[in-house]
Amino acid sequence: MEILKKRIIEDGRVVGKDILKVDSFLNHQIDVRLYNEMGKEFLELFKDEKITKILTVEASGIGIACIAAQYFDVPVVFAKKTESSNLDSDTYESQVYSFTRAKTYKIRVSKRYINKGDRLLIIDDFLANGKAVLGLMDIISQAGATLAGVGIVIEKGFQEGGKILREMGVNLKSLAVVRSFEDGRAILD
Ligand code: 5GP
């Protein structure tokens, strides 16, 4: 997606050897016009998949999942990372290792909101080692629902998540793929 790629090249900042910061338009300040274009693109990519719900994980996936959901005309369910008295006690749960935080956390979704007949599209902002997506896929399979696709805004192609998911046969589509970091800049496919 050319406007996204251009924005990553212009505004993305490389931190350390494997983190891309895109806080000026994706993760902190949000460019809603760009989000709308991404939502339309996700619809174009997955329009034949009979999606009934979009699934993401809090917090950074929620914005793009909601914008995309308006084009699919389906609800968004987001997995929660914190235990709360607001959450139903009957939940599907999975463990996710976050390499950006170097810790494992639990994600939970109330059993009310994913049902057997659902065809889910997972949407997230980044794909790195694939742990967040694998955790969401685990929850979908516990619910006996169907994974119809995975839509990612930025896939870091030099980490293993994309390879793992494609080898599993997952219908994975990324709007931009970062091939490498060179001299503090993102090089895109
Ligand atoms: P994974 O589970 O695929 O290893 O990592 C994906 C999750 O980690 C995403 O939900 C995202 O929040 C975070 N993440 C991974 N890599 C990056 C990165 O380079 N930049 C930012 N901003 N977040 C990242």
Image: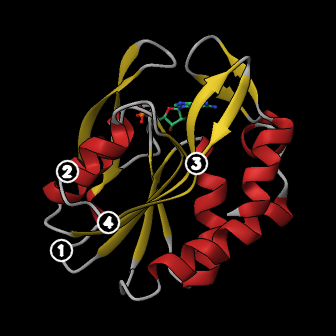
Could you tell which of marks 3 and 1 lies nearer the N-terminus?
Answer: 1
Mark earlier in primary sequence (2, 1): 1
**Disc number lying in front (2 or 1):** 2
Kindly identify the amino acid type of the residue bearing the numbered disc 4: Asn
Q: Which mark lies nearer to you, 3 or 4? A: 3
Check disc 4 and report its element: helix, strand or loop: loop
Which numbered disc, 2 or 3, marks the residue closer to the eye?
A: 3
Disc 4 versus disc 2: nearer the observer: 2
Report which quarter residue 147 is drawn in.
Answer: bottom left
Q: Secondary structure at mark 3?
A: loop
Q: Is mark 4 within 8 Å of ligand 1?
A: no
Between disc 3 and disc 1, the foreground one is: 3
**In this rendering, would 160 be left or right of 85?**
left
Which residue is the site of mark 2?
Answer: 167
Cβ atoms at labels 3 and 4 below 8 Å apart: no
Check disc 3 and give the amino acid type.
Asp
Let me know if residue 89 appears in the view: no
Residue, disc 1? 116
Amino acid under disc 2 = Glu
State the mark number for residue 171. 4
Q: Which residue is mark 3?
A: 189
Q: Residues within 10 Å of mark 1 (few under 14, many from 20)?
A: few
